[in-house]
Image: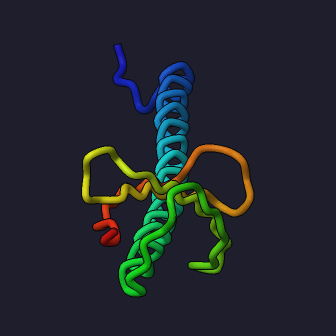
Amino acid sequence: MRARDGFTLLEVLVALVVVAVALGAGVRALGQSADVAGALAERTLARWVAEDHLALLRAQALIPPVGTREGDVTQGGRTWHWTEVSSDPSDSPFRRIELHVRAGEAAGADLAQLVAFQLKPAQ
C-alpha cells in the first residue's frame, strides 16, 4: 500500500459544508446582535424622555391635573410621543403619574413606561 498525499474529494466537500454552516450561524448571530443593540438604544432614549419629562414637572413644581395629557418632544434627533396619565389614589397624599413613551406618532407598544408619585397640593 502506498501512503496518501492529500484529501479525497469527499473529505474536502464535508469540510466545506462544516465551514459553511459555521459561517452561516455566525452571520445570523451577528445580525441578531445588531438588532438587539439598536432596540436597546431606542428603549434607552425613550426612558430618558420619560425621566426628563418627570424631572421637568418636579423642577417647575408642577402637579399635573387628574386625567390624560399628551405631547411630543425631540431628543436624540428623533421625535417621541409621550402620554401622561395622572390619578389620585384613594386615601393617599400622593398623585400617581404614569408616563408612556413611544417613537413619534407610530401606534404600537410603548418603548418606556415610568410611574412616579408627587405630593398632592394642600387643599
Q: Give coordinates of residue 57: x percent, y percent.
A: 43, 77
What residue is at 74 percent from the left and 59 percent from the top?
105
Residue 38 in view: no
Q: Position of residue 81 (x, y in %)?
A: 64, 64
Looking at the image, can residue 13 be seen? Answer: yes
- Residue at x 36%, y 79% (from the top left corner): 58
Q: Residue at x 63, y 76 (%)?
A: 73
Q: Looking at the image, is 16 positioned above or below residue 120? A: above
Q: Nearer the viewer, residue 18 or 74?
A: 74
Residue 71 occupies quadrant: bottom right
Q: Nearer the viewer, residue 31 or 97?
A: 97
Check the image and name the residue furthest to the front: 123
Q: Position of residue 102 (x, y in %)?
A: 60, 57
In-image side of 109 versus 90 (left or right):
right
Q: Is residue 17 above or below residue 76?
A: above
Q: Quadrant of residue 10?
A: top right
Quarter of the image where the N terminus is located: top left
